[in-house]
Amino acid sequence: MSADLHCHSHHSDGALAPADLARRAADNGVTLWALTDHDTLDGLPEAAAAAADHGLDFVAGVEVSVTFAGETVHVLGLGVDAAHAPLRDGLAALRAGRLERARAMSDGLARVGIRGALEGALALAPNPESISRTHFARWLVARGHCADNAAVFRRYLGWGKPGYVEHRWATLGQAMGWIRGAGGVAVLAHPARYRLSPNEEAALLTDFAGHGGAGIEVWCAAHGATDEQHALALAREFELAPSAGSDFHAPGESRLDLGAVPNPDCNPAPIWNKLQASTRELPST
Ligand code: AMP
Ligand code: MN
Ligand code: MN
Ligand code: MN
């Protein structure tokens, strides 16, 4: 089997429709696939139907934006019931803040002489309430301000840069309550990406595990070999199941293509074993 448990469609900041992702996953040899859009469940029905067409085992997912110790942290919910009202309402509240933040980001960019960013980013976002920094990055690259998205984040959209806007997302407790209430398992996404001191990181992991967190991403686009070793050590220390996700967003943009993330044998046992077993338990009618 081959699991890819983290990726994005055009319902958040990915470039492809859920059905195109399902086809790409199947073509690339994925057998267990999760769609995990940022703060929205809108792509899941299309993804589930397309996954079934391609014979993929599908996991309904979401990537929830959380603020912890002043830093934005992402928590994946895997195997969620998309009809669960508290999850739906909580995510709607998170999306509601995005447009206002986008306006402030655009104002920040205007102060360094870049005008029209909000309109430009919105034109690239099929769903305005899911407007994200990625849409701004694509517009800035298309306008020739930077060579690629990574350069945009370094220069304009990363912490402390002109287009960066402080934002309050969900609390960790809220996100965990929504995910677990919806019957999902929570996986801490790309832990090496966070600007946290060692003490803050330990606090994050302690709180995450205390709220019933089940897994931690070890293999993902944001992690180099050292990051993988550290994440695996955290998995052991906090008794979390290692997970793997490409975090694929768009062809030619993402470091890892859909399905290109490794699934090594590991200790503790990986989360994909558990998820595969649970998708197989579903009635096949
Ligand atoms: P937002 O939720 O609007 O803050 O946007 C966050 C998204 O920006 C992430 O999900 C990534 O897709 C993207 N992103 C964050 N940091 C970087 C980076 N350094 N290079 C490229 N994309 C990034
Ligand atoms: Mn993203
Ligand atoms: Mn993320
Ligand atoms: Mn992601």
Image: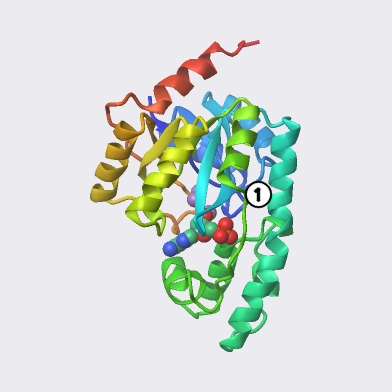
* Image position, residue 144 (x, y; %): 50, 80
Query: Image quarter for residue 110?
Result: bottom right
Q: Is mark 1 on a helix, strand or loop?
A: loop
Residue underneath mark 1:
11
Residue pictured at 48% horizontal, 69% vertical: 159
> Residue at horizontal 51%, vertical 59%?
70
Q: Which amino acid does label 1 sit on?
A: His
In the displayed structure image, the side of residue 159 where residue 97 appears, left or right: right
Q: Which of 223 and 73 is in front in this view?
A: 73
Left or right: residue 88 versus residue 159 is: right
Q: Which of 101 and 40 is in front in this view?
A: 101
User: Going by the image, does 108 lie left or right of 280?
Assistant: right
Q: Report the quarter where the N terminus lies.
A: top left
Q: Image height check: is 247 above or below 57?
A: below
Tell me where residue 125 appears, x and y as whole percent. Answer: 67, 60
Task: Name above or below for residue 16 compared with residue 252.
Answer: above
Left or right? Give the position of 127 relative to 10. right
Observer-nearest residue: 263 or 101? 101
Quadrant of res 241: top left
Residue pictured at 67% horizontal, 40% vertical: 41
Residue at image position (54%, 75%) is 140
Q: Residue lying at the far bottom in this picture: please name it.
A: 113
